[in-house]
Image: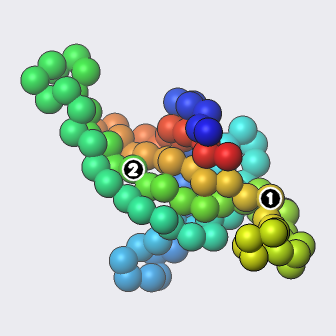
Amino acid sequence: MAKRYDERIEVAWDATSQPSTLVAFFWRSRRYAIDQQLSDWRDGGDLWDRERAHEREYFRVLARPADALASGDLDTDGFLVTPGAVFDIYRDRFTGQWRLARVWD
């Protein structure tokens, strides 16, 4: 199940890696460490409608609150138990603004 948001966030990059990778984002005054980038894609939006035109670069990431660590325990399927979740974040390529699109739980 996913919860939709459209809230502004700040993103931290590791500029020393090639290509540059996302390492964290700040949402609602909390830092989230990105453990893994799962996928990325672009959305061109309604390019024929100038008022709704946009180009967004999406990233689906596995992230957790920066102060929360995995316990090391495994669930019944053998996956590591972690307080993290999957987040879809995007950068509006026209404005440069970063936003949180949805949280998968």
Residue matched to label 2? 58
* Rendered view: 2 above or below 87: above
Identify residue for label 1: 83
Q: Residue at x 25, y 21 (%)?
A: 52
Q: Amino acid at mark 2?
A: Tyr
Number of marks in picture: 2
Q: Residue 21's spot in the image, x, y percent?
A: 46, 71
Q: Nearer the viewer, residue 42 or 105?
A: 105
Residues under labels 1 and 2: Cα distance? Answer: 23 Å
Instruction: Judge depth for marks 1 and 2 and give the one in front.
Output: 1
Quarter residue 79 falls in: bottom right
The answer to which image quadrant residue 83 occupies is bottom right
Instruction: Give the residue at the far front of this rendering.
Output: 76
Above or below, comparing residue 47 to residue 34 in the picture: above
Q: Residue at x 76, y 48 (%)?
A: 30
Picture quadrant of residue 78? bottom right
Query: Please, what is the three-letter code of the amino acid marked with disc 1?
Result: Pro
Which quarter shows the N terminus? Answer: top right
